[in-house]
Amino acid sequence: DTGVSQNPRHKITKRGQNVTFRCDPISEHNRLYWYRQTLGQGPEFLTYFQNEAQLEKSRLLSDRFSAERPKGSFSTLEIQRTEQGDSAMYLCASSRPAAVNTEAFFGQGTRLTVV
Amino acid sequence: QQQVKQSPQSLIVQKGGISIINCAYENTAFDYFPWYQQFPGKGPALLIAIRPDVSEKKEGRFTISFNKSAKQFSLHIMDSQPGDSATYFCAASKTSGSRLTFGEGTQLTVNP
């Protein structure tokens, strides 16, 4: 399977714990995006990498959230001191450089439940 | 500020009918308009996309109509099938930009 891969698929955590999600993009895609989707809503942009550089962050991304993409390959999204409001589906997407094609391909997401 | 508004919120059609979902955008810098299909528990999957230099794009049973002056675009699903039952999202972005702005979604149910 050469699509976007996200792990884990599901995560249940207690409030106050830290969680980390991983995204492996399509290999030739240098752009990587994180989105958050709550039930019944469209995905909301969180942050975006071009290669290893984090170029944009949404104001939705509080100080408890941090994302990295070492060496421009896979990416991790960490949430510290989780809150019940963090419960959502976290989606990763990747795309080729904008000058070529802006089609973004999404992974299946990581569903986070904070109890 | 909701930059992409989508309607209706839910839609029920009979098998073989036409499903129509509408979106309106505000940011005139947007120049790429994709539609995504999402099944429960899955990530969104690109269905079809259009750029503002054309007014219509058709791929199989799916057609996007685009009205640049009205800042509106719509998805038409011809000969709707029960397998089309899913949530559909319109989105918009700047070609050179970094993010997709999504509509609120339309839950489509196609009855047999």
Image (spheres, coloured by chain):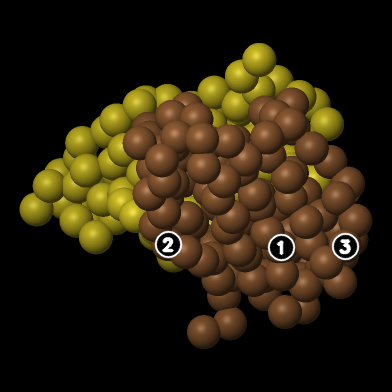
In the foreground, B7 or A110: A110
Query: What residue sits right under mark 2 in the picture?
Result: A9
Q: Residues within 10 Å of mark 3 (few under 14, many from 20)?
A: some
Give the residue type at disc 1: Ser
Q: Quadrant of the C terminus of chain A?
A: top left
User: Residue B72, percent across and down?
Assistant: 60, 28
Query: What residue sits right under mark 3 in the picture?
Result: A52
Q: Tell me whether marks 2 and 3 sit on the same chain.
A: yes
User: Residue A65, percent across and down?
Assistant: 68, 39
Please, is residue A65 above or below residue B47 in the view?
above
Distance from the alpha carbon under mark 2 to that under mark 3: 24 Å
Q: Are marks 2 and 3 in contact (CB under 8 Å)?
A: no
In the foreground, A107 or B44: A107
How many marks on residues? 3
Q: Is residue B78 something that shows in the picture?
A: no
Chain A rendering hue:
brown
User: Residue A93, percent across and down?
Assistant: 63, 58
